[in-house]
Amino acid sequence: MSIFSRIREDISAARAHDPAARGPLEVFFVYSGLHAVWWHQVSHKLWNRGFRFLPRAISQIVRFFTGIEIHPEQP
């Protein structure tokens, strides 16, 4: 699955489960939960490849911007 198809799928799921979501651009730019999940996927892949500092730094930066922290080791 390509990254773009995954993003489209995540946006569609958010719109399907949130009646307040008015459009795909709003979801893409405003939904901090999706941003946290997308960055977690990046940091988790790095974690699985043996990197430790960069994934933890990503999770802390994302927490600063979204208020959501997901440890990179979590699947």
Image (cartoon, rainbow, N blue to C red):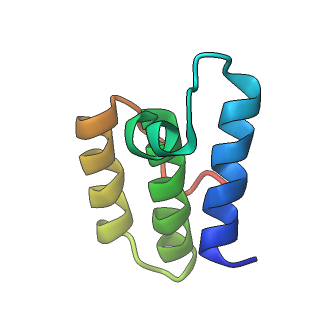
Relative to 24, residue 57 above or below? below
Relative to 21, residue 25 above or below? below
Residue 56, percent from left and from top: 34, 57
Residue 34, percent from left and from top: 52, 43
- Determine whether, in the image, residue 14 is placed left or right of residue 59: right
Task: Tell me the residue at 41%/37% (across/down).
Answer: 69
Q: Quadrant location of residue 57?
A: bottom left
Quadrant where the C terminus lies? bottom right
Residue 49, percent from left and from top: 53, 83
Relative to 41, residue 36 above or below? above
Which residue occupies the foreground of this view, 14 or 63?
Answer: 14
Q: Quadrant location of residue 41?
A: bottom right
Q: Residue furthest front?
A: 23
Quadrant where the N terminus lies? bottom right
Task: Tell me the residue at 58%/16% (across/down).
Answer: 20
Which residue occupies the foreground of this view, 5 or 69?
Answer: 5
Q: Residue furthest top?
A: 20
Which residue occupies the foreground of this view, 54 or 18?
Answer: 18
Q: Residue furthest bottom?
A: 49
Residue 50, percent from left and from top: 48, 80
Task: Tell me the residue at 38%/70% (across/down).
Answer: 52
- Determine whether, in the image, residue 38 is placed left or right of residue 6: left
The number of discs equals: 0
Task: Tell me the residue at 47%/46% (across/down).
Answer: 28
